[in-house]
Image (cartoon, grey):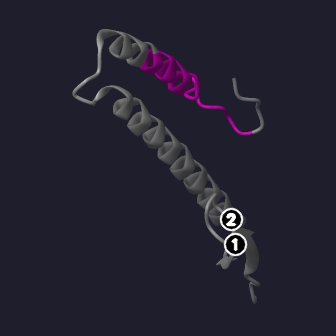
Amino acid sequence: MLRTALIIASQAPGTSSALRPVTTPASAAADAVDSAIEEVVASIRARQRALASSWQSSDADTEQLRIALREYRRFGAQVRQMSPEEPARPGTAAG
């Protein structure tokens, strides 16, 4: 039996569209999940770097440190909200 490879277009932010073969729907789903996770991690790391640069200068005063701590707490809460306590089961709504 001849299987036809599907061609899908994938576009990550900041990249050009690329065509690539997909052998199964499962591999396409796995690729999409991997890509989404990579984007989330990159976004989190960028935010972390921005927060660190806001207070790591040698002339950061107490007020800047207080604001940075508040922003880290807010950021931590946002990251924790992204993690469900229980993984969603197929066919059910998350959260």
- Which mark, by number, is residue 11? 2
Residue receiving disc 1: 17
Residues in magenta, as a range: 71-90
Front-most of 4 and 38?
38
User: Is residue 81 in the magenta section?
Assistant: yes
Front-most of 14 and 19?
14
| Residue depicted at 76% across the width and 30% down the height | 93
Position of residue 71 in the picture relative to residue 27 (left or right): left
- Residue 51 image-quadrant placement: top left
| Residue depicted at 52% across the width and 43% down the height | 43
| Residue depicted at 37% across the width and 16% down the height | 64
As measured in the structure, the alpha-carbon distance from the residue carrying label 2 to the one carrying label 1 is 5 Å
Residue 81 x %, y %:
58, 22
- Which mark, by number, is residue 92? none
Q: Is residue 33 above or below residue 5?
A: above
Position of residue 66 in the picture relative to residue 19 (left or right): left
Which class describes the residues within 10 Å of circle 1: few (<14), some (14-19), or many (20+)? few
